[in-house]
Image (spheres, rainbow, N blue to C red):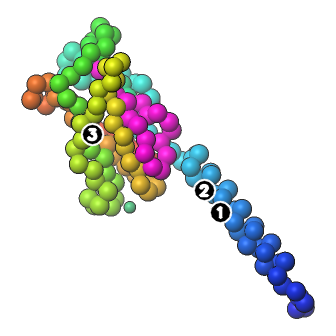
Amino acid sequence: MLLRNPKPVLLLIFGLLGLIFVAYSIVWQVGGKTAISDASNRKILLGTDHYFTYQFNQRPVLGTNILKVQIFKNDGTKTVLSRITGASGMPAMGSSHDSAEQDFTLNKKNDYLLPIDLVMPGDWVIHLTFYQGKIEYGRHTIKIII
Ligand SMILES: [Cu+2]
């Protein structure tokens, strides 16, 4: 049977589609899917006499996330290195989302901070490189699924 006035039905359908879209976006952002390769704040060995931990300012989401790295001597004393860099990318997309190797900035609390831009859902890697003087002291790769 043909509806005499299809407008309200169309509005309802578009309204529902809109709601589904919004709900889907929220679920995607909050994410049951996000995963990180190391537990937050796990001690990761660095050379023979240091370790580091890392954490994000939030469960990683699309957009900019701040990665914090802290360096410790084996006895647990917080310390600094000469330089830490991070380079992020999405291996499945070739080099199209690769960032340059960027320096972490050191704040007053001796935390190393670097903004990480995750521009699309998928599997991401962040390559960390640690320097003592000009010598490469260690490397670690963080994997993120968003
Ligand atoms: Cu992409």
Q: Could you give the CA–CA distance between mark 1 and mark 3, rounded to whole angstroms? A: 34 Å
Secondary structure at badge 2 equals helix
Q: Is residue 54 left or right of residue 50?
A: right
Question: Is the C-beta separation of discs 1 and 2 under 8 Å?
Answer: yes
SS type, badge 1: helix
| Dot 2 beta carbon under 8 Å from ligand 1 | no
Instruction: Specify start and end residues of the magenta stretch as a single range.
Output: 55-71
Q: Position of residue 35 (x, y in %)?
A: 48, 42
Corner quadrant of residue 9? bottom right
Where residue 80 sits, quadrant-wise, is top left
For disc 2, the marked residue is 25
Residue lying at the far left in this picture: please name it: 134
Crowd band around label 2 with a 10 angstrom C-alpha radius: few (<14), some (14–19), many (20+): few
Q: Say what amino acid the circle numbered 1 marks.
A: Phe
**CA separation in Å, label 1 and label 2:** 6 Å
Q: Is residue 20 above or below residue 124?
A: below
Question: Is 9 above or below relative to 78?
Answer: below
Residue wearing tag 3: 86
Query: Magenta includes 69?
Result: yes
Count every numbered label the image shows and give the total: 3
Q: Amino acid under label 2?
A: Ser
Residue 134 seen in render: yes
> Residue at left 67%, top 56%?
23
Q: Provide residue 5's location: percent of width, then percent of height.
A: 88, 86
The image quadrant where one finds the N terminus is: bottom right
Amino acid under disc 3? Gly
User: Quick check: 13 above or below 135?
Assistant: below
Residue that appears at 31% across and 13% down: 78
Q: Earlier in the sequence, mark 3 or mark 2?
A: 2
Residue holding disc 1: 21
In what element is the residue under mark 3? Answer: strand
